[in-house]
Image (cartoon, rainbow, N blue to C red):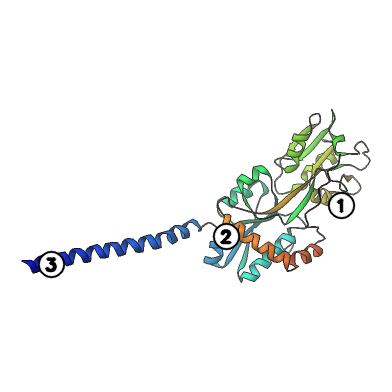
Amino acid sequence: MSEQKNSKLIIILVIISLCLSLLSLYKYHSPQIVQSKSELSGILARINETHELHAGYGVYPPYNQEDPVSHKLSGFSIDIIEQIAKELKCKVVWHRFNWNTMAADLKRGEFDVIADPIFQTIPRAREFAFSAPYAYFADGIAVVKIDDTRFKAFDDLDKDGIKIAVGQGWASETLLRTRFTKASVDSVQTTSDLLQVFNDVVSGRADVAVADGADAERFVKEHSKEVKALFLDAPPAFMPAGFALRPSDREGAEFLNVCLRNLESTGVLEGLSKRYSINSRKPSFSASK
């Protein structure tokens, strides 16, 4: 009888021991399983799983540009992403997007990073996870007709009867609406062509169009006999810009930060800046009056 009790006790102890071992294994491995699932939508997970870096882009020369015939991509931002992929020994898969739907496309997982210099505004801080800024843009640059001499300083735009065209949702629109009270600010919806806001000046629908320096200079270069840019020497504001990822992909943002620090310290960013005639250094702020 005693031997039967001992046998049952041994069996019970073995069962308990097995249960404890299984529980220990579950606790040890379950965090890794959760971690893996949480990373499935991040840029690092896709790189690790497919050896592909999926990046979205708009046309924003000289940061992102596309040859109309060969469709070959080039530009400051394009080359940064390509260099990162080269060092990781992975392939970049490029996705052309519409500026108005880029956030929705990113969140749906069509790509993992917006490879354009996306302006880092307060509302966008809730919408995206950002890398550190790798470009700074003069903001509040005015484009007027070539013979218009009414505006000597930025605040001269804020007068009764002055109609200002600005891109809907742009940082320039926030600047105008928080600083001006008299001028009429007209939001222009842009799609694939960011320069269409300046057409309101050419057509006479607006007295002035306000945008960042890169867009303003590009449009003036193409229409030098019709319009000119104001305040480029003393911009009223500057806007930091960086790569944008899904809000949940904080690890991906930190990964890009490490990449940018490396490319800066090794001189790659400076070399690309010279190639595309870009001043990527943080400006010393001096607002025009």
Label 2 SS: helix
Q: Residue at x 82, y 52 (%)?
A: 218
Mark 2 and 1 residues: CB-CB less than 8 Å, in contact?
no
Q: Amino acid at mark 3?
A: Asn
Q: Which mark is residue 111?
A: none
Q: Which mark is residue 6?
A: 3
Q: Is residue 56 above or below residue 208?
A: below
Label whose residue precedes the other's in the sequence (2 or 1)? 2
Select label 2 or label 1 by which is in front.
Answer: 2
In the rendering, at what x and y percent does residue 41 appear?
53, 56
Q: Which quadrant, please, contains the C terminus?
A: top right
Mark 3 and 2 residues: CB-CB less than 8 Å, in contact?
no
| Mark-to-mark CA distance, 2 and 1 | 37 Å
Label whose residue precedes the other's in the sequence (3 or 2)? 3
- In this rendering, position of residue 253 left or right of residue 176: left
Q: Which residue is mark 2?
A: 43
Question: Dot 2, crowdedness within 10 Å: few (<14), some or many (≥20)?
Answer: many
Mark 1 and 3 residues: CB-CB less than 8 Å, in contact?
no
Q: Nearer the viewer, residue 223 or 176?
A: 176
Select label 1 or label 3 by which is in front.
Answer: 3
Q: Amino acid at mark 1?
A: Lys
| Mark-to-mark CA distance, 3 and 2 | 58 Å
Question: Dot 1, crowdedness within 10 Å: few (<14), some or many (≥20)?
Answer: few
Could one spot residue 70 in this view of the protein? no
Q: Which residue is mark 1?
A: 221
Q: Which quadrant, please, contains the N terminus?
A: bottom left
